[in-house]
Image: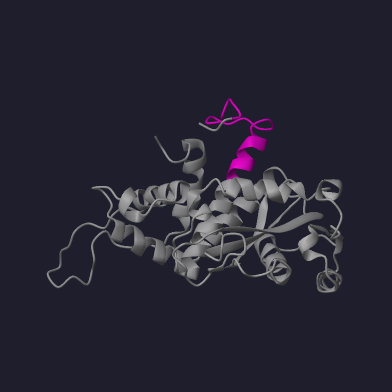
């Protein structure tokens, strides 16, 4: 069984392959002038997607066609080149062109997941008995498409991550509209958060402390749904990566997949193409 449906994996691979640098099939610096043929990027990409979806270690998803060391080396290289971030940016541009991003309504929230291996982006989790955890701060547009992502330790408060998350969202989509409303939960109910929104020229709807959440959920539920979608990827639920660049690689790769899935689901009722899914469930 494939880790992702072909209607989702193929367009992601086509755009990802276009970002890959040209590399020879054989190592040019080998002393004997020969070496084993380099593992194709497509084979490694499929193994990386399996690691993202299932959250398994590289040793478990390795196969006779691709070793765990090859996966580690290639992921490290792709993370240093920022390819997952570029893929997410391409997916956002495609969504904006075909459906249209609702950038006048943004929602930001954080989510704490496990990080048993520790690392650069891990910290003591306040909701998991002090074990190592990862906090993922995500900004989404009106329909829940992820725009900006920031990873930090689980012991970091949501409020200080608001500015870098909004900055990353702006960097991914470019220019934001003149009037932007940001929907936040009670964790951002402070004078610093309101002052930040004022400096950026945004308006804010921030839940008040002491008021039951269902009464003031408003338009913020889309970011909760996006966090649920991203937690469907095992590598994000239980991140065993220690390098911050690799952690960001998997975050943006998951965000790109979520964006592509939303794009296909919404485009299938508006457009027709040869490989168009006929059901809501991507196959």
Q: In the image, 209: left or right of 96?
A: right
Is residue 169 found inside the magenta-colored segment of the image? no
> Where are the magenta residues, as a range?
260-280
Vertical arrangement, residue 125 with respect to residue 276, above or below: below
**Res 270 quadrant in image:** top right
Residue furthest toward the top? Answer: 278
When asked about the image quadrant of residue 232, the answer is top right
Of 159 and 273, the residue lying toward us: 159
- Left or right of 40? Residue 186 is right
Q: Residue furthest left?
A: 32
On the image, the x and y values in percent for residue 53 come to 47, 46
Magenta: main secondary structure equals loop
- The reply to whether residue 162 is visible in this rendering is yes
Quadrant in which residue 106 is drawn = bottom right
| Display colour scheme | one colour
Residue depicted at 47% across the width and 68% down the height: 118
The outermost residue toward the front is: 129
Residue at 50% x, 58% y is 250
Decide if residue 195 is on the left or right side of residue 49. right
Left or right of 217? Residue 27 is left
* x, y percent for residue 51: 42, 51
Q: Residue at x 60, y 63 (%)?
A: 135
Q: Position of residue 95 (x, y in %)?
A: 66, 47
């Amino acid at each position: 069984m494939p880790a992702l449906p072909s209607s989702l994996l193929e367009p992601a691979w086509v755009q990802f392959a276009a970002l890959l640098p040209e590399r020879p099939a054989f190592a040019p610096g080998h002393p004997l002038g020969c070496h084993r043929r380099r593992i194709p990027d497509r084979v490694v990409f499929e193994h990386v997607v399996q690691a993202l979806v299932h959250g398994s270690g590289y040793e478990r998803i390795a196969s006779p066609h691709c070793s765990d060391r090859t996966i580690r080396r290639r992921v490290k290289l792709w993370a240093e080149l920022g390819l997952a971030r570029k893929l997410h940016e391409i997916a956002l541009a495609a969504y904006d062109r075909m459906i249209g991003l609702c950038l006048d309504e943004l929602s930001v929230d954080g989510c704490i997941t496990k990080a048993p291996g520790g690392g650069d982006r891990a910290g003591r989790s306040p909701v998991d008995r002090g074990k190592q955890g990862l906090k993922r701060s995500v900004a989404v547009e009106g329909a829940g498409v992820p725009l900006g992502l920031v990873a930090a330790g689980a012991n970091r408060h949501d409020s200080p991550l608001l500015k870098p998350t909004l900055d990353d969202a702006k960097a991914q989509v470019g220019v934001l509209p003149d009037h932007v409303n940001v929907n936040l939960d009670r964790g951002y109910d402070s004078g610093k958060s309101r002052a930040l929104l004022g400096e950026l020229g945004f308006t804010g709807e921030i839940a008040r402390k002491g008021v039951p959440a269902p009464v003031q959920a408003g338009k913020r539920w889309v970011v909760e749904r996006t966090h649920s979608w991203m937690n469907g990827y095992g590598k994000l639920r239980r991140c065993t990566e220690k390098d911050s660049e690799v952690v960001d690689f998997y975050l943006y790769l998951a965000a790109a997949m979520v964006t592509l899935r939303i794009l296909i689901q919404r485009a299938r009722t508006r457009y027709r193409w040869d490989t168009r899914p006929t059901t809501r469930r991507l196959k």
